[in-house]
Amino acid sequence: MSHPGPSAVEITLSTDERAGPRRRTGSPDRCPAERARIILACADGMSNAGAAVHAS
């Protein structure tokens, strides 16, 4: 039996809240940059799977 996991939650970020992740997308450190791209993609309405593909 498969377990679908938790339901998606809408992420809404203000302009100020987007500033930090936007700065991190250019980070030479790969992990924070990937996390920032995922956060921004989800805040723009992308699915979890789509955000994961987009970030890598």
Image (cartoon, rainbow, N blue to C red):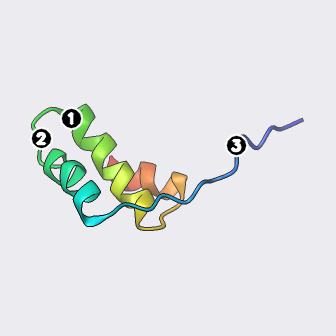
The quarter holding residue 44 reads bottom left
17 vs 28: above or below: below
Q: Amino acid at mark 3?
A: Pro
Q: CA distance from mark 2 to mark 3?
A: 30 Å
What label does residue 27 carry, if any?
Answer: 2
Number of numbered discs: 3
**Between residues 20 and 25, which one lies in front from this camera angle?**
20
Q: Relative to residue 29, is residue 33 depicted above or below?
A: below
Residue sitting at 33 percent across and 46 percent down? 56
Relative image position of residue 13 (x, y in whole percent): 37, 60
Left or right, residue 1 beside residue 50: right
Disc 2 + disc 1, Cβ < 8 Å? yes
- Few, some or many residues within 10 Å of mark 2 (<14, 14–19, 20+): some
**2 or 3: tag closer to the N-terminus:** 3
Report the Cα–Cα distance between label 2 and label 1. Answer: 7 Å
Q: Which mark's residue is nearer the viewer, 2 or 1?
A: 2
Label 1: which secondary element: helix
Amino acid residing under circle 2:
Ser
Q: Which dot marks residue 30? A: 1
Return the x and y of residue 22 as percentages of the image width and height. Answer: 19, 55
How far separated are the C-alphas under marks 3 and 1? 27 Å
Apparent side of residue 47 relative to residue 8 in the rendered image (left or right)? left
**For this view, does 9 lie left or right of residue 21?**
right
Mark 3 neighbour class, 10 Å CA radius: few under 14, some 14 to 19, many 20 or more: few
Residue under label 3, please give it: 6
- Of residues 27 and 52, which is closer to you in this image? 27
